[in-house]
Image (cartoon, grey):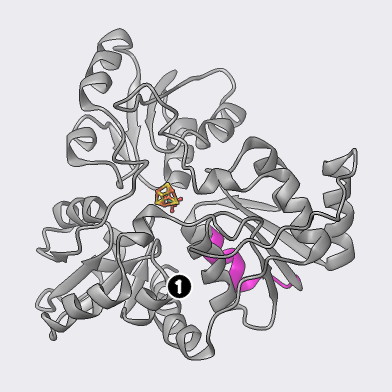
Amino acid sequence: MFTTLSSPKVGLPRDLFGAIADLKRELNAVVLAHYYQDPDIQDVADYLGDSLGLSQQAAKTEADVIVFAGVHFMAETAKILNPNKLVLLPDLDAGCSLADSCPPDAFAQFKAKHPDHLVISYINCTADIKAMSDIICTSANAVSIVRQIPADQPIIFAPDRNLGKYVSEQTGREMVLWQGSCMVHETFSEKKMVQLKIQHPEAEVIAHPECEPAVLRHADYIGSTTALLNYCQKSSSESFIVATEAGILHQMQKAAPNKQFIAAPPVNNCACNECPHMRLNTLEKLYLAMKTRSPEITLPEQTRLAALRPIQRMLEMSI
Ligand code: 13P
Ligand code: SF4
């Protein structure tokens, strides 16, 4: 795992929101945040979005400092796109179970077994995996990117098996799938989902494609976090069962205050639908990161350059 630099000597101001606003001006910083962050962090973000939107923002920002309120692979992507900017992650331990499910050595061996395959990797992977990939995708553009690849070109899709299976079904393309998964999206219970549907027959089920096929088959709509947020605003339905990390409910409730949003239930009676990695970031840590300009994301230049190429291909193919 990564090393967290703590700043025990820096005290916290009474008005964290005001202090963060002051630091944004002082540092010429932009706060980019994912929907799975704590509501407080979402509320101080200059840009809030899904992985595609966040990388597009990172690619075009003119700020000197990027404060990334998300997980490590997201901040790392911002750094790959901005080698000369300071990229801060409030807690360097904010990793990702899906990225961890694809270790570079094992993936190199897997790739070597399929030498004629094009490698499309979901952005939820480390820079080392990106460096071994031809094109990066996110849940927002995976189907479209696979459709742009000539039909006779064999494809490896990594690391998320559920997204890979969903993309295969949507495109009719057989792909070799790396068997990785996200601990949060695999936590939803099909049985409890069906019970919930019986209790709320009027509700639409909306789900992220990282969910297992058993959950996805009950979904009325499947999409990235931004797509889910847009869908629940424009749908005529008044209530939704939401199968993704529970942090997005904050934006859904803000965007459609008169609608009802019900978090899909996990298998156990736990808060497993909250990503423990994302939730390592707090507003306090975000303030401290800005105040102390650490912890910052760094990576070897050779890896950065190799990882940049497939990210740029994704951005070009997503226009
Ligand atoms: P998107 O926001 O791109 O849909 O991704 C969800 C996710 O799991 C991020 O970790
Ligand atoms: Fe990774 Fe899943 Fe958390 Fe997203 S929700 S950061 S895929 S562990």
In the picture, measured across the screen, residue 196 lies left or right of residue 38, that is left
Whether 23 is drawn above or below 44: the answer is below
Quarter of the image where one finds residue 148: bottom left
Residue drawn at x 38%, y 53% is: 97
- As drawn, is 65 to the left or to the right of 247? right
Q: What amino acid type is highlighted by mark number 1?
A: Leu
- Which residue is at 21% across, 50% downward? 166
Residue annotated with mark 1: 315
Q: Is residue 275 above or below residue 2?
A: above
User: Which portion, as a residue range, is magenta?
Assistant: 54-63
Name the quarter where the C terminus is drawn: bottom left
- Along the line of sight, the residue nearer the viewer: 293 or 83: 293
Q: Residue 99 falls in which quadrant of the image?
A: bottom left
Front in this rendered view, residue 301 or 225: 301
In the image, residue 234 lies in the stretch drawn in magenta: no
Q: Is residue 128 left or right of residue 187?
A: right
